[in-house]
Image (cartoon, rainbow, N blue to C red):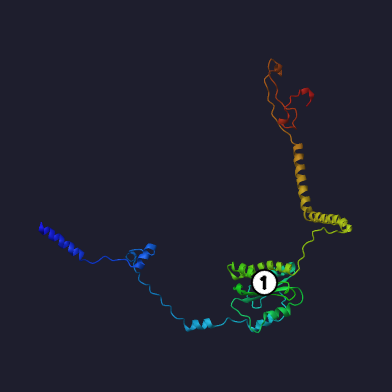
Amino acid sequence: MKFAVWMLSAGLALGAAGPALPSWEPDDLKALKKGELVPGLLLLTEDLPEEPVPAVPPPTAEEIAQAAKPSPEVAEKYLEDYFGARPEYFLVDPQGLLSAKDFKDREKFLKYHSGDSEIDLFVYLFDGHQEIPSEVREEEIVERHFSEGKPAVVVYYYLGAPERSDIYVSPLISDAVSAAEQRRALVSSVEEAMEKPDKVAQFEAFCVQLAIRIYWMERAAGLVRDTPSLPVLRPTVQASAEPEVKHSKMALKVHEIAAQWGAPAGIMALAISAVIGGVWFARRNLKYRLPVFDVPPRLGGAHAAGIGAVISFGSTTQSPSSQRNEVPDYLGL
């Protein structure tokens, strides 16, 4: 018994002599109460090894030279065709950047716009990587060539890079059309062009959108007048002559139709008349040959007191279906 008590006392003494339990630091205890510290978080996470950063080779001398190379300028031989005088065409492309078909289509559109608008649209076409020489000042070109005549909007368009485009207006409308309005028209046209997949479609969309925006420039410059709401009185002579013009137009139209379709219609009418006449003549001379069925007499009489009958047809020129009524022989029918 004493031995057991001694062993228990020795075990308690050894346990009391062990390492002390850890205690919280005041800062850690505050962080724990605030929820900023999670106990055991370091044991639940692993330190991932850092991924090696791929080494990027330095640029070569050729790449540096190519990056430092400036964009090519428009060749000097084209400067006279571009800026020598007011353009004869609405699309200026002396370098032949567009194909013949695309150039014709765009020129046709710009020409149609000129006939339908009070402001012309001239487009100078350059390559997307080209630069206009520094000695050429676009504002002076516009002022020199477009100060007289019909008002115009001049655009320097870079094929394949519509965001580089510039817009100018002739001095006749520069005061009425503000720079902000010009900028809005250009930005709207560029945004419309950037939605297209290829450079030719971009150029087409740019021209169409800018033509629409020019309409608002016309209104700002006072070149478009609203249609008067009151009816316009017209002379009575014109009103009386209008029916005669209509009748003359109608007569001319009838004459044209008769000249075009008169001969075929006459031939067709003659053929139909011949067919109808032939059918009528054939039916007129048609004769039916019908057999006569002999009925045995009854009680010595041909009709046997109504018991029997002689089946025959009175007319050979009529169909059997039309001879349904019984007619006595003595009538001679």
Inspect the image, locate mark 1, and give the three-letter code of the amino acid beneath it: Ala
Which quadrant of the view contains residue 248?
bottom right
For the C terminus, the quadrant is top right
Q: Examine the rendering and report whether any part of residue 101 can be seen.
A: no
Count numbered badges in the picture. 1
Residue nearer the viewer, 278 or 234: 234
Residue 157, image x and y in percent?
Answer: 64, 74
Question: Is 301 located above or below residue 269 in the figure?
Answer: above
Residue 80, image x and y in percent?
Answer: 68, 82
Question: Is 276 located above or below residue 323 in the figure?
Answer: below
Which quadrant of the view contains residue 185?
bottom right
Q: Residue at x 18, y 62 (%)?
A: 12
Question: Is 282 located above or below residue 249 in the figure?
Answer: above
Q: Residue at x 20, y 64 (%)?
A: 16
For the N terminus, the quadrant is bottom left
Residue 65, image x and y in percent?
Answer: 51, 84
Residue under numbered circle 1: 180
Q: Examine the rendering and report whether any part of residue 240 can be seen.
A: yes
Residue nearer the viewer, 144 or 222: 222
Q: Residue at x 89, y 57 (%)?
A: 236
Mark 1, secondary structure of its residue: helix
